Image (cartoon, grey):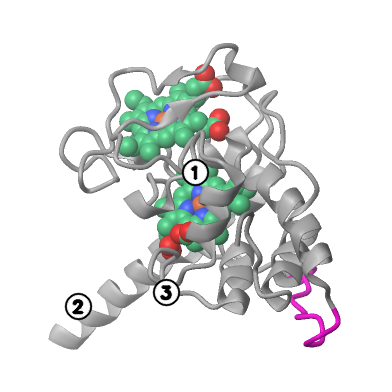
Amino acid sequence: MKNLYLIALASALLTLCAPVFAESPDIIIELPAAGSVSTEEGFKAWGRAYEVTSHTRCANCHVGPSEWPMWSGQAYGKTRVHGMNVMAGESRIGAETIQCSTCHAYREGTNDIPHAAPQVAMNWQLVPIEADWFGKSSREICTQLRDPARNGGRTMIELAEHLNHDLILHWAWNPGGAREPAPYSLQEHIDDLLVCGIAGFPCATD
Ligand code: HEC
Ligand code: HEC
């Protein structure tokens, strides 16, 4: 009986977790050969990566100590905090008030209705405080992202893999509902990060 319960629990968990990660077979993660990339090229690649990380599709969730997700970008008109008094709280998932997943649950299909809540993954939530990108400079985001103490303990390759694993990222390049997609493509963004990485991840004023 207990075993049956455990099996049921495990399969329920698997179903819950399944939509959260989706590796795309089309994405190639290939680190350039060591020494093949100049610092100059590394800087250029970071310039493009900064256009992505500072884009509203990313920055609206990459908010620091503030508990408010942001509504910004062309589709919103003016920049403001999330409506309906939604706050992420210390939990970053709104556990203290109303959970993000109440409205942002995973749903199959595209998010093509303007102003409907994006329904992309069950783990829709604000980032840990240290991954604060909203309104931050190129140098600030660059130094945060290359620092394993502040990027979730990730190496360059692990960052690239994270980008491919997470459904939210795939959505950001194909958001639907009149939202502007993040610039370049997921593949180009991953390539740029790997180029930065192999060039020693140079940040401005190093
Ligand atoms: C729905 C909110 C949300 C959106 C939108 C979002 N992220 Fe994140 N992101 C997160 C959360 C939550 C984490 C922490 C999860 C983890 O570390 O495993 C995270 C972590 C990351 C990390 C790991 C390194 C770090 O500094 O923590 C990278 C890289 C990243 N996001 C890139 C992006 C990019 C690029 C975009 C836009 C194309 C984006 N994210 C959009 C929520 C979001
Ligand atoms: C009561 C429903 C509701 C809850 C709860 C909710 N949201 Fe939203 N959220 C929405 C709606 C609706 C939109 C789209 C608004 C629009 O496009 O005008 C939205 C949009 C967003 C956006 C902007 C996405 C983009 O790039 O366009 C972010 C970021 C966001 N929510 C984060 C969160 C986080 C984090 C939580 C939990 C702390 C949360 N939301 C809880 C309804 C909700």
For marks 2 and 3 on the same chain, the one whose residue lies earlier in the sequence? 2
- Screen quadrant of the N terminus: bottom left
Residue 133 tag number: 1
For this view, does 129 lie left or right of residue 121? left
Q: Is residue 32 magenta?
A: yes
Task: Determine whether the residue tagged by mark 3 lies in a helix, strand or loop.
Answer: loop
Residue 5 tag number: 2
**Residue drawn at x 36%, y 73% as measured from the top left:** 11
**Residue drawn at x 28%, y 20% as measured from the top left:** 85
Give whichever of 188, 94 is nearer the camera: 188
Residue 153 tag number: 3
For this view, does 19 lie left or right of residue 161? left
Task: Determine whether the residue tagged by mark 1 lies in a helix, strand or loop.
Answer: loop
Q: What stretch is highlighted in magenta?
A: 25-36
Q: Distance between the residues labelled 2 and 3?
A: 35 Å
For marks 3 and 1 on the same chain, the one whose residue lies earlier in the sequence? 1
**As drawn, which residue projects farthest toward the front?**
205
Task: Determine whether the residue tagged by mark 2 lies in a helix, strand or loop.
Answer: helix
Q: Does the residue labelled 1 lie within 8 Å of ligand 1?
A: no
Near mark 2 (Cα within 10 A), the count class, few <14, some 14-19 or many ≥20, is few
In the rendered structure, which amino acid carries the disc numbered 1? Trp
Give whichever of 64, 184 is nearer the camera: 64
In the rendered structure, which amino acid carries the disc numbered 3? Gly
Q: Distance between the residues labelled 3 and 1?
A: 17 Å
**As drawn, which residue projects farthest toward the top?**
77
Q: Is residue 34 magenta?
A: yes
Q: Is the magenta stretch mostly helix, strand or loop?
A: loop
Specify whether residue 128 is in view.
Answer: no
182 to 115, vertically: above or below = below
